[in-house]
Image (spheres, rainbow, N blue to C red):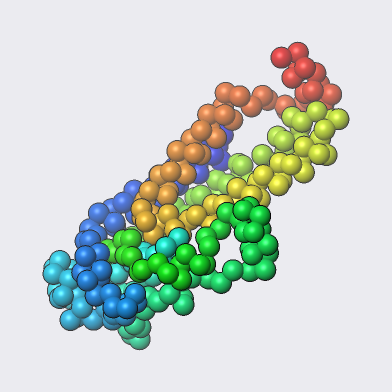
Amino acid sequence: MLGTAGIVTALVAAGLLFRGAEAGQHDVRPALQARIQADSLSLQLDAATLQSFGVGVGTDGKPVQLTVAYSYGPFTNVQTRRSDDAALPVLRMSREDTVQPDSVIGVFFRKLHLNPFPDPAQGMTAALHIERADVADVPSTAHGWKVALAMCLFVAGFAVGPGVCVWLALSELMPTRIRSNGMSIALLINQFVSTMIAATFLPTVGQHGYATMFFWWAGATLLYFLAAAFLLPETKGKTLEEIEAHFARR
């Protein structure tokens, strides 16, 4: 409960920090959509480009950041550029960099109609569409340190809470007759969920921002806290047989 409460506090704090930074974003999607030529787009985040956006950001000399989420059919990508980058790299959106070719395994399962991943054939014919494009001032150094401290609190809360307690609880609460198989299934589910979080993090951030993602997981962790507080029994000083008998009576 202590570790999970720390995680909720850290996620809410990070979400509020990102919310404050994202509140100053300006939508420049129409300007970028108008620049598309032959289903591709190239631009450099220089003073002339910022002036063409017409949102008043960057005119005071402060560095700004452009975040663009775009798609070719079911294939999506997210890119960012900062105006204070010494190299000032060109932001290029092209089909070749976004649409990934199908693998041998993907082709096999697609024939069986079991492949859940996007079909490259759809991406090769789809037009470039700007899903989201925002430009805003780059957050201050102090803001970055506050986010870093929130992440440190998250790691500390996870280390003293769910990072170790969940595996101890699972090994104690599962009946002896199914403990080996049950732990295997629990590990498989844990790795699957972790993979899905990693796979959906960047697309979600690109579409809805960092604050939305952190608030969402703060809510999910709050449910975790309530489950630990009201549903997880205390097993200190009890043998595995006594724990199993406790659940058998229920």
Q: Nearer the viewer, residue 130 or 167?
A: 130
Question: Residue at coordinates 46% horizontally, 67% vertically from top-left?
Answer: 123
Give left or right: position of 35 versus 180. Answer: left
Residue 238: % across, % down: 78, 25
Looking at the figure, which quarter contains the C terminus?
top right
Q: Is residue 233 above or below residue 97?
A: above
Give left or right: position of 78 versus 84. Answer: right
Residue 110: % across, % down: 62, 59
Give left or right: position of 182 versus 166. Answer: right
Q: Is residue 103 above or below residue 202?
A: below
Q: Nearer the viewer, residue 93 or 200?
A: 93
Q: Is residue 182 above or below residue 249?
A: below
Q: Nearer the viewer, residue 157 or 98?
A: 98
Residue 83: % across, % down: 28, 77
Residue 77, can we see it? Answer: no
Question: Residue at coordinates 65% horizontally, 46% vertically from top-left?
Answer: 190
Residue 182: % across, % down: 77, 37
Question: Residue at coordinates 53% horizontally, 62% vertically from top-left?
Answer: 119
Furthest residue toward right: 177
